[in-house]
Image (cartoon, rainbow, N blue to C red):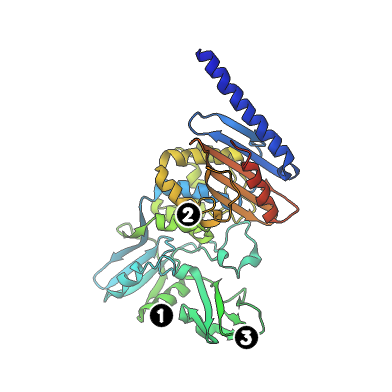
Amino acid sequence: MKNLAFLFLLALASCQSSHLQIAFNESSLAQRSSGVMIKDLSTGKVLFEKNADQYFMPASNMKLLTFLQANRILGNQIPSFKYRETKDTLFFWGTGDISNLHPGTKNTALRDFLAASSKVLVYGAPLKPLPIMGSGWAWDDYNDHYSADISDMPLYGNLVSFSAAQRRWNIMPDAFASVAKTGSTLEVRRNRLKNEFTLPELKTEKYGEQQVPFMTSPDMTAFLLSDTLHKSVETMPLAVHPDARIFYAGKMDSLYVPMLHESDNAVAEQLLVMIAAEKGWDPTQVIDNLKKEPGNEFMKDIRWIDGSGLSRYNLIRPKDFIYILEALAREVAPERLHALLPEANKTGTMRNVQDINPGVRIWAKSGSFGNTYDLSGYYKTKDGKTLAFSVLSNLGNTSVREIKKSVVEFLKAIH
């Protein structure tokens, strides 16, 4: 009887695999560089795989790996900054926390802590400057909000916000108002090499909000803090003192949600800086060091370049994402994991994925740039089974919208 049950289940799995193979062959996925792996998490059975051992550009799917590592190392509270007080001086150092004075998170812990001190304020700048962009990023994205500088102490998300009402500009932080002039552009444009901004002529009452990265430096950090606090902040290159204490402010999930729901690249990059600060590592070596950590042996064959997936140099296989998804399912409570990942037809970058089978729920991280759309996450069938899936589709000579449509159509073949 047991043998008959086993044979029946085997036949069902074989039928599912054949059905998915037909669906793949009939979709435009087969006409592009595409790889797929689908696995039943309860049985460990691989239901379907196609090119699962080949490498693809993951785009923002890479944030799943960043999340896995950050969740293991950083705990529940945000390590906002480090500090050490002497008789007359308050020294402080950045930990990479992007939430400081960020308009979204509204974390004012650093500002309030420094404002309450009557001592000389000294910002300890890194002895070795951090690269402001990741390797393989597109240089001409410098004016776009998703390409903010990487830094040890981000302020205001390392972005300047421009909006207008009644034909008057509102610039935040307002310290940048003095370097913003009206010109002949159609949108706000920053000089590529310095913090000078050209504003479009206001021909209507309003101008929708536009966020533009500003160029960071230790001097700029000290200047912005001085301007915000209305008192002097000095800066000097200074190693973190071994007796420095960590100031915690806010929940880590408040960073994971924008990274996973809205694919916030800056959060992803700054999480790597935070990991380096927590471990006492050189931030430029954080990925290499993570690969040497116990439990990360699976990463040895992954070409991991940045935290966000903006780099075209990242290379990963569908089977690697299945391993990451399995690890997340083991290490993160289901309710929390489902809240952190965007859900099809409901939240984040998955809110517009509406054409799914009745009774099905999908929580997944999408990723895209020109000619590429990738989707990796969890598929809950109408009878309650949870599957991990990864569909990576690169080099499509068509729009991202069309590639996305083919990925979603293929997923509908899962029963």
The answer to whether residue 268 shows anywhere in this view is: no
In whole angstroms, how far apart are the C-alphas of marks 1 and 2? 28 Å
Q: Residues within 10 Å of mark 1 (few under 14, many from 20)?
A: some
Mark 3 or 2: the one toward you: 3
| First reached walking from the N terminus: tag 3 or tag 2 | 3
Count of all numbered marks drawn on residues in the image: 3
On the image, which quarter does residue 197 sit in?
bottom right
Q: Is residue 137 above or below residue 405?
A: below
| First reached walking from the N terminus: tag 1 or tag 2 | 1
- x, y (%) of residue 405? 66, 50
| Element on which disc 2 rests | helix
Q: Is residue 161 above or below residue 414?
A: below
Identify which residue is drawn at 45% across, 55% down: 256
- Using the image, tell me which numbered label, if any, was put on residue 272: 2
| Amino acid tagged 1 | Asp
- x, y (%) of residue 206? 56, 82
Identify which residue is drawn at 62% across, 30% down: 16
Mark 3 or 1: the one toward you: 3
Q: Residue under circle 1?
A: 227
| Element on which disc 3 rests | loop
- x, y (%) of residue 103? 44, 70
On the image, which quarter does residue 351 sit in?
bottom right
Residue at the farthest front position: 358
Query: From the viewer's perspective, is 212 left or right of 15?
Result: left
Q: Quadrant of the C terminus?
A: top right
In whole angstroms, how far apart are the C-alphas of marks 3 and 1? 27 Å
Q: Is residue 315 above or below residue 110?
A: above
Query: From the viewer's perspective, is 77 left or right of 211?
Result: left
The answer to whether residue 63 shows anywhere in this view is: yes
Identify which residue is drawn at 58% across, 22% down: 10
Q: Residue under circle 3?
A: 201
